[in-house]
Image (cartoon, grey):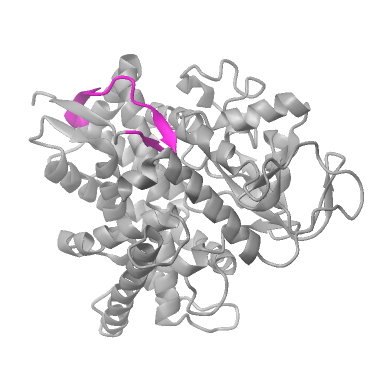
Amino acid sequence: MELFYASLLGFFILFVTISLHFLFYKEKGGGTTAAAGRLPPGRTGFPVIGESLEFLSTGWKGHPEKFIFDRIVKYSSNVFRTSLLGSPAVVFCGSGGNKFLFSNENKLVQAWWPSSVDKIFPSSTQTSSKEEAIRLRKMLPNFLKPEALHRYIGIMDTVASRHFADDWEGKDEVVVFPLTKRYTFWLACRLFVSFEDQKQVERLEGPFGLLAAGLLSVPIDLPGTPFNRGIKASNFIRKELVKIIKQRKVDLADGKASPTQDILSHMLLTSDENGKFMHEADIADKILGLLVGGHDTASSACASIVKFLAELPEVYDGVYKEQMEIAKSKGEGEVLNWEDIQKMRYSWNVACEVMRLAPPLQGAFREALTDFMFNGFSIPKGWKIYWSANSTHKNPEFFPEPKKFDPSRFDGSGPAPYTYVPFGGGPRMCPGKEYARLEILVFMHHLVRRFKWEKLIPGEKIICDPMPNPEKGLPIRLFPHKA
């Protein structure tokens, strides 16, 4: 069955099914004519399917930017019309498009994703996934702001040390991508719900993988399908989280848990603007969403960093030198702290350049809340709008010689606003940006301290499905540093 889904025929059936799903089940509204003005240039492609197959196939081939740049050239416009996932859509390109969308979140546009997502992430409060995401964004800043994260760096360091001891050391070869997913999931479990026991993490790791696969599968809820397994895995994880939440409430009341130890305690003790506290099932929904959000993008970024450091020995040498200076300044058993993280300037520039060339979030959809005008074009209410990180990241207008790996692009004040957008931008900046920076830098610190490595498949591609991931998981041969 898995081979079937990987086949060309499987891909064709997948997108026909998705398109039919949206054709019959999408929300009301979203007409195809503008209230006033002219629509952006473009075409809708094949009936029902639109241009979805070409849009996603460029990512499978490792060149997701091709769909975008081919049409920018064809229509001589940074705004163009298409049809994606069964809906009329407009693609906004360039820093101007990014700024407009990020600045008008929940004013002219709102986040959008397929309705099938609500089946895997059903809300206990009977609200949509979009509404839940808005509520979660309001709650996160206090927990994820830099000063709040300072106290978690030592925990990150300890988790990373155990991860490398268990899964990397003593091995001649490893497959990187499954290990980076394990690292980020373990870290999220530890910091969000204070899992101390690795067996607790392993109990959820398998179901979590099924859930993630279900999100990217054909939305057919029949026994044995990946979508059905994803729904079952989501329900299982939520039930496990409710058990943990109930126990935490008891521990907080008995003084056995700290109000500031993790985001779970934060959610239990934080009321909304009306003084109401969240129910246990509601908190479980939010924690599950955080585990997904804090896992996929960071694991993709960490795997891409391993790939680029294997290919660029001079860059590896610069990262190694910086990290070893920090390691040598530490006493026996002393963990990393905020001051150490601030010294990792070159390492973070390298990570940023990796995320420019292989952005963990290739882009995202929005939905027009009302008719509006942009760049002289009318955007009808209900239409989907897609923004693409690659429209600026790989554009020579914003990054000269865009294919060249150059960490110095991020020296000083770095790129111009709204051109480098792996975490969004402006008011729509990802609240987990600083958390991601810390987990990536801690990963790099432990990796280069221990090993050099080489790729076992020199020409292995990075494909986007929809996040960048190595086509074969990135198998590497490890060369431990001598003590």
Residue 461 lies in quadrant: top left
Extreme-front residue of the structure: 9
Name the side, left or right, on which 259 lies relative to 199: right
Q: Residue at x 65, y 35 (%)?
A: 417
Q: Is residue 203 visible?
A: yes
In the rendered image, the vertical position of residue 251 relative to residue 58, given as above or below: below
Residue 453 versus residue 152: which sits nearer the camera? 453
In the rendered image, the vertical position of residue 361 relative to residue 306, given as above or below: below
Q: Is residue 129 magenta?
A: no
In the rendered image, the vertical position of residue 109 relative to residue 481, given as above or below: below
Q: Residue at x 22, y 32 (%)?
A: 327
Name the side, left or right, on which 258 lies relative to 462: left
Residue 332 versus residue 269: which sits nearer the camera? 269
In the rendered image, the vertical position of residue 482 relative to residue 27, given as above or below: above
Q: Residue at x 26, y 26 (%)?
A: 325
Q: Is residue 451 magenta?
A: yes
Picture coordinates of residue 106 (x, y %)? 69, 60
Residue 440 lies in quadrant: top left
Picture coordinates of residue 412 (x, y %)? 54, 26
Residue 397 lies in quadrant: top right
Q: Residue at x 30, y 85 (%)?
A: 253
Q: Is residue 259 visible?
A: no
Name the side, left or right, on which 427 lies relative to 203: right
Q: Which residues are magenta?
A: 449-471
Extreme-right residue of the structure: 36
Name the side, left or right, on which 129 lies relative to 91: left
Picture coordinates of residue 54 (x, y %)? 58, 36
Picture coordinates of residue 217 (x, y %)? 43, 54
